[in-house]
Amino acid sequence: MREDIKKILLDEEKISKKIKEIGKNISEDYKGKELILIGVLKGSVMYMAELMKQIDIPCTMDFMSVSSYGNSTTSSGVVKILKDLDASIEGKDVLIVEDIIDSGITLKYLAQYLRAKNPNSLEITTLLNKPERRKADIEVKYIGFEVPDYFLVGYGLDYAEKYRNLPFIGILKEEIYK
């Protein structure tokens, strides 16, 4: 797998340090509130697991699975909910946890869908933000890293369901996905 990586963009140490900082900010901002983290499967799992360890207030978690990519490298623009929430978020403070925001199309749809469920508040955190590719206007409260427009894998990010288990974020060689 590592031979398919052109360059390591973010190593484990840099990722860990940033997640600690984000967790501290979330803990301060949500002190005394009923926070629920909603992870967007499958990519957010590693970020969400590490982030929860850094949040020192009570919180719960749930997961959703949405798709607009399939096995493609670009969004189709059609968003499908494959797995909905297990519990109500009405009156709760919700934080959507994403691995990467690319076009923003899927996340904008998801945020609108969740707002219709009447949470007290709804914010977004993403480990990676790729503003060059943005097609939908979306506000993100907690951003780990702004990243350039490369095809990235590792730390939850995949290409055709592979590479998620790499402990770093790397640039995938073009010949792998072209």
Image: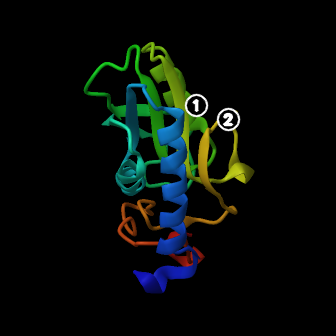
Q: Which residue is mark 2?
A: 136
Residue 75, how many percent across, how many down?
56, 45
Is disc 1 placed on a helix, strand or loop? helix
Residue 167 showing in the rendered view: yes
As helix, strand or loop, the secondary structure at mark 2 comes to: loop
Kindly identify the residue that appears in the image at 51 percent across and 21 percent down: 121
Between discs 1 and 2, the one toward the N terminus: 1
Q: Is residue 4 left or right of residue 62?
A: right
Image: 108 above or below 46: above
Q: Which mark is residue 108?
A: 1
CB of mark 1 within 8 Å of CB of mark 2?
yes
Residue plotted at (62% across, 39% down): 140
Task: Give the quadrant of residue 178.
Answer: bottom right
Image quarter where the N terminus lies is: bottom left
Q: What type is the residue that disc 2 sits on?
A: Ala
- The percent position of residue 87, horizontal first and vertical second, equals 27, 23
The amino acid marked with disc number 1 is Lys
